Structures are given as structure tokens and as C-alpha cells.
Image (cartoon, rainbow, N blue to C red):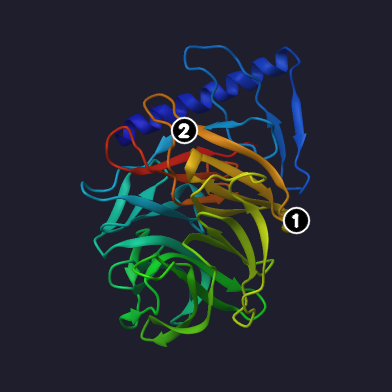
Amino acid sequence: MSSENRRAHRTMTNVRASRRRRRAADIGITARWVIAAGLVASILIAACGGDDGDETELSFESPAREATASGETDPVPPGGDADDPAIWVHPDDPADSTIIGTDKLGGVAVYDLEGSEIQYLADGDLNNVDLRDGFRLGGESVTIVTAADSTTQRLAIYRVDPATRELVDVAAREIMLGVAAYGSCMYESPQAGRFYVFVNSEKEGGDPGGQVEQWELIEAGDGKVDARRVRSFAVGSQTEGCVADDEEGDLYIGEEADGIWRYRAGPDAGDSRERVDSTGAGGHLEAEVEGLAIASGPGRSGYLVASSQGNSSFAVYRREDNDYVKTFTIKGTDGIDAVEETDGIEVTTHDLGEAFPDGLLVAHDGSDDGGRTNFKLVPLAP
């Protein structure tokens, strides 16, 4: 889909949404669902007939079990395989924010919010990607982006250049990991002001996978970043998706065949954990458990969102107590296919301008109709 077509599609989407809201108000249909965690009050959009069917923004607390992808990124290059996204929020103009997505068979790409590719770095088989703002580098506050190469077992480190919105390699050296790299995520300790990367291992040979290493990022001078290993532990079996809740100091890990676990994220936390949810009977997930993301709200409210790849759905939990909320799927519209077999996901509740004023969920689509994988964009509800 060209940039011009994406703009036209998004404009028509906004117009149709406005018309639906006006019609709902005229006939007195208003359904307010108050988010218990205080994230935001969500209005359930009334269903109105039409050739295009319902177009539903994602509300975590509404009973709606289906959301709609309003956009998608360009596909990764032929022979590649998209996997995991991150969202960079532009500090001056949120509409210029970007989506950073890995191609686990080739590198990493940067897309604008219309899904057009800005940059592609053929930097190796980078599987998962994450970022954190506020890292001090050369006397400046920068956004650090990390990913792990599953072939060379190398930790890739970049910064975002806000002028170009592109990634710049800042790794001080070839940082070799101690595990067969698979998934990864970042953590910032607000108390200590330190930045970390968690990397977990892929199952290979007699190794069941699920080995986790925690690395601290360190300024190395000359605008470069180094890292040192500060912790390691074992989950038990293959794990990939993970996400850290910086404010709460929690680390969530998806054990693919078993469920979701909550650990403490500090480097001295050890391996104690609590179960959040499980696959199979009594749980709300179907193996494999893949991507994890935090939708932050005020007062430490918000949600944990998990990709249940086995049934192409997404499970939602309240952030403060991990209580299960609901499961939803993502459908397509107007030439955009539905989301299936998702690996990585990311979500932000920041205002990203006219297209995504209430935030954005980005989901990897593992079975794109065009034959090449990409990422789908889902607007959050007001």
C-alpha cells in the first residue's frame, strides 16, 4: 500500500469513526466502561451497519473481543521474516514517532506511522528489539535501542537520531552473549538510574532453552556503549517474549509452552517468581506464548498484554494485580489482512498525533496475505 493510499485510508477511517460516534449520540446509545485501574475511561463504539462492517478501536476494558488493524508497515525484504516491534515516541512531534521492527533473518527496520520504511539495516539475524529513553551518552540524553543476533550471539546496541529518526550503531565492541540468543527486552531501574538488557536462550541440542542473562549497559566514552553481565537464571524451558515494568521493578517472561511468569527485575533478585497465567486447562493462553507488552496508565495503572500465538489471539491482564481481563483478536479491513501467528507486540498509551491520539498497539503478523511478513497497527480507544 503506498503512502498516499495509507493517508487516504486513515482519513476515511477517522471520518467513519466520527460519523459512528455522532450517530450513536443521536440515538442515545452510549456505553461507558470505566477502566478499574484508572488508565482511561473508554467509550464502547456502537455498531453501525455498512459495507465495511464494524471498525473497532482497541479498548482493554470493553467487552469487545475484536479490534481492527487500521494500518500496516511495509513488509520485510524477500527472504526475511518480521518478528518483534518497538515504538519510539518523538520528543517534539509525536506524529513523527516511529516503529522499529526486527527481521529475524536479516536485520532491523524503522517505519513511520504510515508504515513506510525509513531505514533498513542488514545487521544480522536480530530477533527481538526494545528501547529506553534517557540514557546518558556523551553528556546528552539519548534513546538506546538493543537487539540480540540469534546467529552470532552478539548484542546489538543503537541510539535513535531524532533529526533523521534513524538508528546509529553505538556498540563499543562486539559484545558476545553467554547464551544462544533468542528473545530480549530492556529495563531501566528508576531508583539506580541504570539500564539493563535481558537476553534469553533458544532451544538447541540438549539445551531446553530458557536460560536468561541480564546485562548492564555502560557508557564507554567516545559516544559508545558497552555492557557487562550481572545476573543469570533459568526459566525451565523455551522462552522468548519478555517485558520489564520499570515503575514496578517487575520482569515478565513468557515460557512458550507453559505460560507467563513474573520475576523481579533488579540484578540481585535471584530466580524467585510468581505465575501470571498458564496454557491449557485453567489458563487463558494457547502455546506458544510469545510477545509481551505493558500499556502504562496514570498512577501505575494499566495492562499487561500477551500474544497467544497458538490461537492467534491476545490476552489482557491488569498491571497492578495481574488479574485476567479478556482475550481479543485483530481483524483486517480495506485491504489489510487479519493478524495471525503473532510473535512480538508493543503498545504505547502516548498521544501519537491525529492518527493515534490515544495510543497504538503494534503486532507482528506471521501470516501476511502478501506472502511477506510485516507489522499491523491498531489504534487504542479514547
Q: Quadrant of the C terminus?
A: top right
Q: Nearer the viewer, residue 59 or 91?
A: 59
Amino acid carrying label 1: it is Asp
Q: Position of residue 211 (x, y in %)?
A: 48, 72
Q: Residue at x 28, y 41 (%)?
A: 372
Q: Is residue 155 left or right of residue 242?
A: left
Res 163 seen here: no
* Residue linked to disc 2: 70
User: In the drawing, what numbered circle is on residue 321?
Assistant: 1
Q: Residue at x 51, y 68 (%)?
A: 186
When the figure is inspected, residue 247 is found, relative to residue 230, above or below; the finding is above
User: In the orientation shown, which residue stands out farthest toward the bottom?
Assistant: 221
The total number of labels drawn is 2
Closest to the camera, between mark 1 and mark 2, is 1
Q: Quadrant of the N terminus?
A: top left
Amino acid carrying label 2: it is Ser
- What separation in Å lies between label 1 and label 2 (alpha carbons)? 31 Å
Q: Residue at x 52, y 47 (%)?
A: 307
